[in-house]
Amino acid sequence: MTTIVDRARRIVAGATRRGCRRHPVTVPLPGGRSLRWREDDRYPESMLDGTYEPDLVNHLLRELTPGATLLDLGANSGYLSFLSKAVVGAAGRVIAVEPHPDNLATLQDRSRLNPDLPVEVLPAAVAPATGTVTMHLTRNLANGRIDEAGWSHQKPAVDTAVVPARSLDDLLTDAAPDVVKIDIEGAEGAVLDASTGPGGWPTRPVFLVEYHGHDNRDRCLAVARRWGWETSDEPDAGELPAGLLVLGPPR
């Protein structure tokens, strides 16, 4: 198991490795802005041709406005965070919450490349309770998961790390977001279910939830119905039992 000290060392080492990668490429963003990315790291081709998470990108563009706040739970390498920052502008906030050591190094590198798109990075996992959690690291850096996650297509772990954790309620209280994106590899339902609900939050954000597995989807929908919120389900076009839920207060 990787300790928190080991994790910090890996972040520094990862940042050094990424600094040696090939030259940056420019990815167009909404509103005439652009994003600097590494040409050999994390899907720049799909960012350029518009095939990177197109449904989620469209919903972010629809829900976010200048001055809004996005809480990005499971930010991964940060593309959606930086794209969202271009939309909300200088008066808005984007908080990228990410626990994976290598993903944090990538976020650090991309922040250096894009000083005009200041994203706030919180090195933590979102979990049912604030404290620490064990994270299972996988070869694909997008598939790390906490203990509460579980679905039929999860990838095998190659290592573990103990990381800081924040509950959804704590994060919502601190950030007061307008939109929340959640993509945490099968723990979405557990995190939503552990929340006390909208009555204790400072805002009533729209949730964009990338679910993993039908059981997880059903758990998320049950929580939203308990809150009296509206829901929509956009299943993945592929063969995986996955998709995008939009959860929000009645309009």
Image (tube, helix red, strand yellow):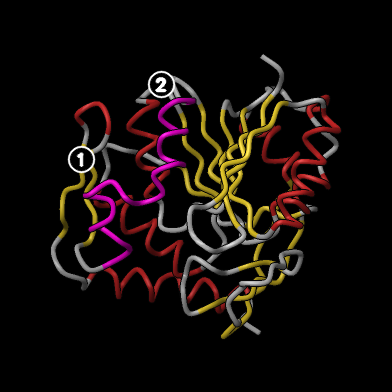
Element assignment for label 1: strand
The amino acid type found where label 2 is placed reads Ala
Would residue 208 appear left or right of 134 to someone viewing this image?
left
Q: Which residue is mark 1?
A: 28
Q: Position of residue 193 (x, y in %)?
A: 82, 46
Q: Position of residue 156 (x, y in %)?
A: 60, 82
Residues rendered magenta in the picture: 41-63
Query: Looking at the image, is 10 positioned above or below residue 190?
Result: below
Q: Amino acid at mark 1?
A: Pro
| Residue at the image position 55 percent from the left and 53 percent from the top | 74
Residue 11, placed above or below residue 222:
below
Please tell me the numbered disc located at residue 91. 2
Answer with the quarter of the image where residue 176 lies.
top right
Could you tell me which secondary element the residue under label 2 belongs to?
Answer: loop
Q: Going by the image, does 111 lie left or right of 97?
A: left
Residue at (27, 31) in percent of width and height: 30
